[in-house]
């Protein structure tokens, strides 16, 4: 199992196009790797050509809104975040980030409606990355 704790270079390139660079908390060095696997601080945001921004899982999780509201023609719908981990078999987990309209029913039960989700991903960071891209493309972030 390959667990990722920060965005890969392709994900970082995409995020650098859609997010403020200041939201990155890590940087790939000029050779496209993290120095000795550790984060370091970028001294100048103007050195983007040399040092590539990179986001840790924690930085991306902090960007996710806990909820957002869509206004329809006749009503508003509030979507709340739902983060799930599925244990398929021993040592194999899948992750999903979703936003849904949580409804309580008269019989005391509840359910999620109108789900927007990433599908199941091998790594939580892949699910968070996909959801951030969707939220940005749909003006929710």
Image: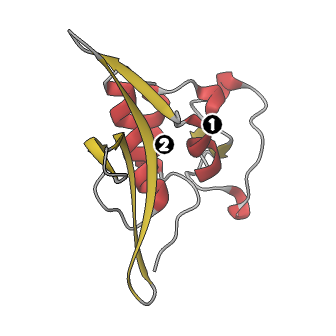
Locate residue 73: give its quadrant.
top left
| Residues at marks 2 and 1 touching, judged by CB atoms closer than 8 Å | yes
Tell me which numbered mark, 2 or 1, is placed earlier along the sequence.
Answer: 2
Indicate the position of residue 135 as horizontal and vertical percent values: 38, 31
Image side of residue 5 versus residue 26, left or right? left
Indicate the position of residue 53 as horizontal and vertical percent values: 59, 38
- Would you call the spot at circle 2 few (<14 residues within 10 Å), some (14-19), or many (20 or more)? many
Image side of residue 9 versus residue 42, left or right? left
Q: Nearer the viewer, residue 107 or 78?
A: 107
Please identify the residue farthest to the top as the structure is shown. 73
What colour scheme governs how the chains and residues are painted in the rendered image of this protein?
secondary structure
What residue sits 27% from the left and 15% below the top? 75
Locate residue 52: give its quadrant.
top right
- Would you call the spot at circle 1 few (<14 residues within 10 Å), some (14-19), or many (20 or more)? many
Q: Nearer the viewer, residue 38 or 68?
A: 68
Which numbered circle lies on residue 24?
Answer: 1
What residue sits 58% from the left and 52% below the top? 57
Indicate the position of residue 37 as horizontal and vertical percent values: 68, 63
The number of callouts visible is 2
Indicate the position of residue 138 as horizontal and vertical percent values: 31, 24
Question: As displayed, is residue 32 above or below residue 86?
Answer: above
Q: Which residue is mark 2?
A: 12
What residue sits 40% from the left and 53% below the top? 127
What residue sits 35% from the left and 62% below the top? 121
SS class of the residue under badge 1?
loop
Image side of residue 91 versus residue 44, left or right? left
Image side of residue 32 versus residue 107, left or right? right
Q: CA distance from mark 2 to mark 1?
A: 9 Å
Locate residue 49: give its quadrant.
top right
Q: Nearer the viewer, residue 33 or 68?
A: 68
Looking at the rendering, in which quadrant would you find the N terminus?
bottom left
């Amino acid at each position: 199992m390959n667990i990722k704790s920060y965005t890969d270079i392709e994900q970082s390139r995409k995020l650098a196009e859609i997010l403020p660079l200041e939201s990155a908390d890590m940087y790939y060095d000029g050779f496209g790797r993290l120095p000795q696997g550790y984060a370091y601080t970028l001294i100048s945001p103007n050195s983007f050509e040399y040092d590539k921004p990179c986001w840790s899982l924690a930085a991306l999780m902090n960007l996710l809104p806990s909820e957002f509201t869509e206004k329809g023609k006749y009503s508003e719908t509030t979507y709340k975040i739902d983060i799930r981990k599925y244990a398929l078999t021993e040592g194999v987990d899948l992750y999903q980030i979703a936003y849904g309209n949580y409804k309580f029913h008269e019989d005391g039960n509840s359910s999620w409606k109108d789900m927007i989700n990433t599908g199941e991903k091998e790594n939580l960071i892949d699910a968070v990355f996909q959801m951030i891209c969707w939220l940005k493309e749909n003006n929710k972030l």
